[in-house]
Image (cartoon, rainbow, N blue to C red):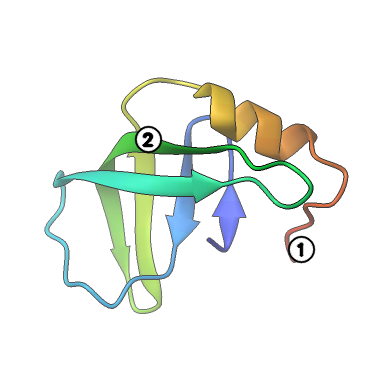
Amino acid sequence: MKNLSLSGALMKSDCDFRLHTLIEVRIKLPPPSPRAAVVKAHVSRKLKEGVGIEWCEFAPNIVKEWLRSPSVRFPP
């Protein structure tokens, strides 16, 4: 993932997804947390380097936990 927010993410992908495709994204928190979850999302944007996705449920718990993690940093 290149970017993550409460509403969705920008994700690298080798697949050629169609717009509005329903996908499942496995998110694993960085160590020391062993927590992982699968989150449903829709493809909302297609880009050369991947896809923009929107979570089916706003602010999934695993995403909130990841954004709160002090060890997670995304490039500007």
What residue is shown at x 38% (from left), y 38% (from top)? Answer: 38
Q: Position of residue 69 (x, y in %)?
A: 80, 39
**Left or right of 59, for residue 55:** left
Check disc 2 and give the amino acid type. Answer: Val
Residue at x 49%, y 24% (from the top left corner):
60
In the foreground, 18 or 25: 25
Vertically, is 41 above or below 11?
above
With respect to residue 67, does 23 lie above or below?
below
Rendered location of residue 49, percent (x, y): 40, 77
Give the Cα distance between marks 1 and 2.
Answer: 24 Å
The residue pinned by badge 1 equals 76
Question: What's the mark number on residue 39?
Answer: 2
- Residue nearest the viewer, comparing 15 with 65: 65
Instruction: Tell me the kind of residue under disc 1.
Output: Pro
**Residue 24 coordinates in the image, percent (x, y):** 28, 44
Identify the mark at residue 59; answer none if there is no mark: none
Q: Nearer the viewer, mark 1 or mark 2?
A: 2
